[in-house]
Image (cartoon, rainbow, N blue to C red):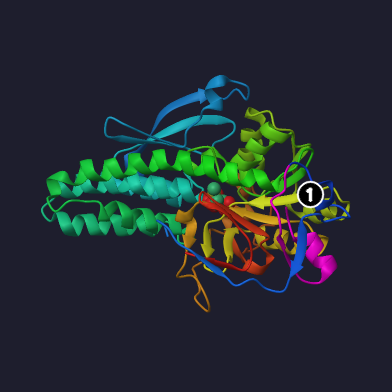
């Protein structure tokens, strides 16, 4: 179980001295059985595999029924007969529409405009985009140059999630010499990654189970479910699994301004899976924590640095500080493909700045006083020492982190 509450009382970090068997009532209460304070553990390095719009047109539109079975199995990405179908998440939960994408630039636009979003899902979309780029390049005058130009556009469609760059690199590395073999090889890579994501999400949920207890009240931010990964989800997948295995009493869902991924997508996915939840405004988290109504915060990541520093949806850092202040465990769940060991020390990453219009007129509805300007950073960075645990497909990691 978690060290943090105990650590604050003891004035230091804690580590598990034994694996919890079943529910430890003391773990979040007065008696932190199974935990002892430590000064600082030696970091353990963890290695492994890691670490235009013109082409987009509506394929199908359906009236959205919250309880429909079809809606329960919505996939963010499908590839069939040479066409990439992308669920337009900007329209959810009120409308289900797939965009039909025929070329890499169409995929790049869908990523940049957030029809598809969530770090692993945009990585997967990028892998399929490489296949589309390869097909186009092989038919062009200069295959190498065309491929490199298209892949460069895809890799930089959004700057913060490392998955995008990583999948483009991996997919292009899988190409044979002969351009005639590029498309098949890139598609094989993308489809393989799609299958791998299922296994990775399932493993994350399995490892994360150790962090939950029956009746817990959990808070999450943004959307980290199947819509964000193309499988069962990272942090949200863990929440759903924990609810099924142990029974959570409540999930608090930050609405996640300005694009409302929490209110629109997370609440939708939890509803589909019958997990009790309440949407709260982002600013309400502090109040619920102060009232003792939150036992655990679990979020996803767009990039995790070597020491556990985590770039994630704007508002995540605020939650980490709040959780620390209130002695509540703050957990990050993400696959290894979201880890970037080169992000360490003084290295800075680019934090995506999106259009001020998203803040001034959320979802297209003008809110702010006319003439106002706005700042709109899409992500923030939480220092690793505020992260109580990191869950990946290869296990559970405790601070101090040295992630590969
Ligand atoms: O801007 P978004 O919607 O792509 O941001 C998504 C997030 O911040 C998620 O928490 C993160 O990508 C992890 S998704 C499993």
Vertical arrangement, residue 332 with respect to residue 106, above or below = below
Q: Is residue 66 magenta?
A: no
For the magenta stretch, what is the residue range?
1-21
Residue 166 locus on image (x, y percent): 38, 57
* Ligand 1 within 8 Å, label 1 CB: no
Question: Does dot 1 land on a helix, a strand or a loop?
Answer: loop
> Where does residue 131 sit, x and y in percent of width and height?
27, 45
Above or below, 400 relative to 168: below
- Report whether 141 appears left or right of 245: left
Side of 158 relative to 136 (left or right): right
Which quarter of the figure has residue 11? bottom right
Q: Work out whether 123 lies above or below 195.
A: below
**Residue for point 50% across, 30% down:** 74
**Residue 236: where, in percent of width, then height?**
62, 42
Residue receiving disc 1: 295
Q: Residues within 10 Å of mark 1 (few under 14, many from 20)?
A: many
Residue 19 sits inside the magenta stretch: yes
């Amino acid at each position: 179980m978690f060290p943090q509450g105990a650590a604050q009382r003891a004035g230091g970090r804690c580590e598990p001295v034994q694996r919890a068997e079943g529910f430890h009532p003391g773990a979040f209460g007065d008696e932190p059985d199974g935990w002892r304070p430590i000064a600082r553990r030696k970091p353990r390095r963890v290695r492994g595999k890691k670490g235009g719009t013109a082409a987009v047109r509506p394929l199908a539109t359906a009236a959205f029924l919250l309880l429909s079975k079809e809606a329960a199995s919505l996939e963010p990405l499908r590839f069939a007969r040479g066409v990439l179908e992308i669920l337009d998440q900007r329209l959810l939960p009120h409308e289900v529409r797939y965009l039909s994408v025929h070329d890499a630039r169409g995929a790049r636009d869908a990523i940049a405009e957030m029809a598809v979003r969530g770090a692993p899902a945009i990585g997967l979309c990028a892998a399929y985009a490489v296949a589309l780029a390869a097909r186009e390049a092989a038919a062009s005058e200069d295959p190498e140059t065309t491929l490199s130009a298209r892949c460069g556009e895809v890799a930089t469609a959004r700057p913060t999630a490392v998955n995008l760059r990583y999948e483009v690199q991996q997919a292009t590395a899988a190409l044979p010499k002969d351009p005639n073999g590029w498309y098949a090889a890139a598609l094989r890579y993308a489809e393989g990654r799609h299958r791998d994501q299922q296994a990775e999400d399932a493993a994350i949920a399995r490892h994360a189970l150790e962090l939950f207890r029956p009746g817990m009240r959990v808070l999450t931010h943004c959307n980290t479910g199947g819509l964000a990964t193309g499988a069962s989800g990272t942090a949200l997948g863990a929440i759903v699994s924990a609810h099924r295995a142990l029974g959570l009493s409540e999930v608090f869902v930050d609405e996640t301004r300005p694009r409302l991924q929490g209110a629109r997508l997370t609440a939708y996915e939890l509803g589909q899976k019958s997990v009790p939840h309440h949407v709260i405004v982002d600013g309400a988290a502090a109040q619920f924590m102060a009232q003792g109504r939150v036992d655990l915060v679990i979020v996803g990541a767009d990039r995790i640095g070597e020491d556990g520093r985590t770039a994630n949806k704007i508002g995540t850092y605020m939650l980490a500080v709040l959780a620390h202040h209130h002695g509540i465990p703050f957990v990050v769940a993400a696959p290894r493909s979201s880890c970037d060991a080169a992000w360490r020390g003084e290295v800075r990453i680019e934090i995506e700045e999106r259009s001020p219009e998203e803040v001034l007129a959320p979802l297209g509805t003008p809110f702010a006083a006319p003439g106002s300007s706005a700042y709109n950073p899409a992500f923030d960075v939480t220092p690793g020492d505020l992260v109580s645990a990191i869950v990946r497909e290869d296990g559970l990691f405790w601070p101090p982190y040295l992630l590969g």
